[in-house]
Image (cartoon, helix red, strand yellow):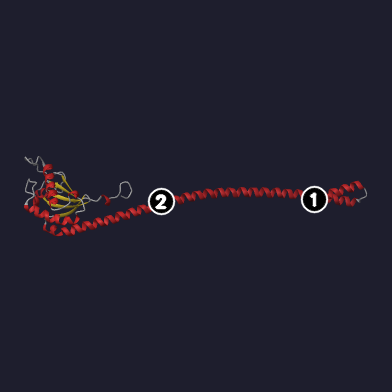
């Protein structure tokens, strides 16, 4: 029975004056019961709304944490992907350098194989100095003492070398002249710088006459300032008096200083 109906019934009973006491008391009891049920229902609804609100607030907090976690994971993923891309780039560069190194080694080996006969005769040495492949020819074989003009025997020996170098004419070579530490001062050469430079130039000019491309040649003189042996002994001085033909590394074979591939 609805509370309004009960109240209406009570009003009727109170005005009629013809209702039994027991009926009136029952109506009052029912009113009290319904009032209690209403209060309980309202409290339960309020408790439910508060619990639901707390749950929603908790879920919103969890959602916020998930958003932060997602953003953090996405940032970590971006960093990992960036590091992966950088690692792949570094790996590709290392592979490129390895391939170029293998090509250089193959080229050096080919040169050594071709010059083996001349090395066996003692006319030539193939060595590595300062990371560069160097053909070393004693000045005594190429030039008379104190002279920068090739001897006949020197021309013959040098012609044999150039004949092989023509197979590598697309590569650049630097011809370097060296002397011992004995001072020289003549009308033609003021000091060992002049002599070593003139000898290097004589070799370059001879190589050009033998059809080696001039654009791939350079001449330099070091005088007595780049010895390979002790100048205090005659054998040491003899080793220091030399012509070197140096294979110049291709810039494409060297690691990029900027970190970019050439």
Dot 1 alpha-carbon crowd within 10 angstroms: few under 14, some 14 to 19, many 20 or more: some
Does residue 97 appear in the picture of this structure?
A: yes
Decide which of 142, 138 is in the foreground and name it: 142
Q: Residue at x 88, y 50 (%)?
A: 24
Going from N to C along the chain, the mark reached first, 2 or 1, is 1
Does residue 180 appear in the picture of this structure?
A: no
Residue 83 at what x, y percent from top left? 41, 51
Tell me whether the residue at label 2 lies in contact with that at label 1, contact meaning CB atoms closer than 8 angstroms: no
**Which label number is shown at residue 34?**
1
- Horizontally, residue 178 falls left or right of residue 6, namely left
Give the residue at the far right of this rendering: 18
**Which label number is shown at residue 258?**
none
Q: Is residue 222 above or below residue 85?
A: above
**Depth-wise, is mark 2 or mark 1 nearer the camera?**
2
Q: Residue at x 65, y 48 (%)?
A: 53
Residue 187 at what x, y percent from top left? 6, 40
Residue 125 at what x, y percent from top left? 15, 54
Helix, strand or loop status at disc 1: helix
Q: Residue at x 76, y 48 (%)?
A: 39
**Which label number is shown at residue 83?**
2
């Amino acid at each position: 029975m609805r509370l309004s109906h009960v109240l209406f019934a009570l009003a009727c009973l109170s005005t009629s004056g013809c209702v039994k006491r027991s009926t009136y008391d029952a109506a009052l009891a029912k009113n009290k019961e319904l009032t209690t049920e209403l209060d309980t229902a309202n409290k339960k609804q309020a408790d439910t709304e508060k619990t639901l609100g707390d749950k929603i607030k908790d879920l919103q907090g969890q959602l916020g944490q998930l958003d932060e976690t997602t953003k953090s994971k996405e940032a970590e993923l971006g960093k990992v992907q960036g590091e992966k891309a950088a690692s792949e780039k570094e790996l590709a560069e290392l592979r490129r350098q390895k391939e170029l190194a293998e090509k250089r080694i193959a080229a050096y080996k080919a040169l050594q194989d071709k010059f083996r006969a001349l090395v066996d005769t003692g006319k030539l040495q193939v060595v590595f100095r300062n990371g560069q492949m160097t053909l070393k020819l004693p000045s005594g074989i190429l030039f008379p003492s104190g002279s920068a003009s090739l001897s006949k025997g020197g021309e013959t020996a040098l012609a044999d070398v150039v004949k092989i170098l023509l197979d590598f004419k697309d590569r650049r070579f630097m011809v370097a002249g060296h002397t011992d530490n004995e001072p020289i001062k003549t009308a033609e050469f003021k000091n060992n710088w002049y002599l070593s430079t003139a000898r290097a130039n004589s070799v370059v000019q001879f190589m050009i006459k033998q059809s080696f491309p001039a654009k791939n040649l350079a001449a330099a003189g070091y005088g007595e300032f780049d010895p390979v042996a002790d100048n205090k002994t005659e054998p040491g001085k003899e080793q220091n008096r030399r012509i070197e033909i140096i294979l110049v590394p291709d810039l494409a074979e060297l690691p990029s200083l900027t970190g970019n591939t050439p």
